[in-house]
Image: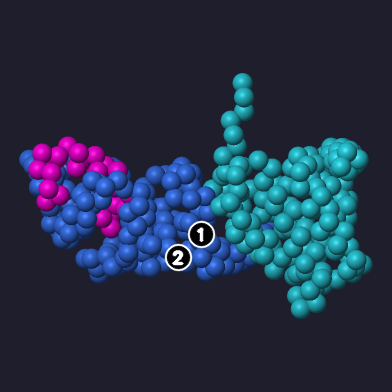
Amino acid sequence: MKVSPELDRRFRDAAADAGLLDVAYDMVDTPIGELFVATTEAGLCRISYDPEPERVVENLARTVGTRVLRSARPVDETRRQLAEYFEKQRTEFELDVDLRLAAEFSRRVLDELARVPYGELTTYGELAKRAEHPRAARAVGTVMNRNPIPIVLPCHRVVGASGSLVGYGGGLERKEVLLRLEGAIL
Amino acid sequence: MMEAVATIPPFERFYAEHRDAIFGFLARRLGRPAAEDAFQETFLRALRAYDRLEHGRHLRAWIFTIAARVATDVHRKPSVKLSLGEEEAASEDSRPAYLELEHLADELPPAERAAVVLRYGYDLPYSEIGAALGSSADAARQAASSGIRRLRRKEGLA
């Protein structure tokens, strides 16, 4: 017997309200496609462009905890701020982030990344310098590539020393769209 | 080749796989309106225990045992809205029996344990136990009777 959508939603809300989830996630519609957005009690922990969310779910269950459930409400605040960002009504995200998935060095780099302002560009080498590892430009590239929370942690603002866009986890086209939206490139 | 230890699936996958069967089971036992509350309670109880699971085997039997327990609790509590049919007969004196059984059956293999508890503790027909265990009514009957035999042997030796 099929569970009605209302009953299904009621359970998902109750599970989140009771604080029983390791991770709550939902899909969020944006102009650059559907995003997978996940949050813990501590804050936003994952945004993914992966077209197969099951893979991300399995991964979170292995790394954070098995109690991973799709639940809209815990993700609503992120959804709202993303919508404002894409409507150019927001230049900074006011969200707690949970970087437990990142290693120590990555965390330092991601902390620096979070300080790169809206509409501005920086380079891999510059970011390495700010993270006090001036020769680690390549390692910074790897950290960007594995950024658990793209858009909110703006790895799209990091480009090559020559000004080329280099790469992006969600594909170069998305990087371009984001930088155009912010007015960082024409 | 040895079968790999069954990993515990993300709760989402576990829930999506069993929600319809559990709701059907509860609706047959309690009627639809009461089944809705019992459904939520069943999966909340599962969620509370989920991070203490040691492996991902027999999850279907596990969630059905929880649902059966919730259904019995609903019958016992007059405060919970009920649409009782002829099942009103689930009387109070059935309670010690199944509590005792769950305890006794603790050491049985999971499928036998679930079959014994669902049959003799909750009085479910073999067709429903089969559905709960993902097997046939015959297989459920066999699991229950071999579980009972095993229990008798254990008692005999004690």
| Kind of residue sitting beneath label 1 | Leu
| Kind of residue sitting beneath label 2 | Pro
| Residue B158 percent coordinates (x, y) | 87, 42
Looking at the rendered structure, which numbered label has been put on residue B91?
none
Q: How many C-alpha atoms fall within 10 Å of the one at disc 1: few (<14), some, or many (≥20)? A: many
| Left or right: A168 in relation to A68 | left
Identify the chain of the residue marked 1, using the numbered disc in the image: A
| Residue A169 percent coordinates (x, y) | 29, 43
Distance CA(mark 1)–CA(mark 2): 10 Å
| Left or right: B52 in relation to A111 | right
Q: Label 1's element?
A: loop
Please report contact status of discs 1 and 2: CB closer than 8 Å, yes or no.
yes
Q: How many C-alpha atoms fall within 10 Å of the one at disc 2: few (<14), some, or many (≥20)? A: many
Judge whether residue B82 is colored magenta.
no
Q: Label 2's element?
A: helix
Looking at the rendered structure, which numbered label has been put on residue A74?
2
- For this orientation, the residue located farthest to the top is B1
**Could you tell me which residue is drawn at 18 percent across and 54 percent down?**
A112
Is B158 situated above or below B75? above
What quarter of the picture does the N terminus of chain B occupy? top right
Looking at the rendered structure, which numbered label has been put on residue A21?
1
**Could you tell me which residue is drawn at 71 percent across and 65 percent down?**
B38
Q: Colour of chain B?
A: cyan
Q: Foreground: A120 or B12?
A: B12
Q: Is residue A32 visible?
A: no
**Could you tell me which residue is drawn at 42 percent across and 59 percent down?**
A40
Which contiguous range is marked in magenta? A130-153
In blue, which chain?
A: A
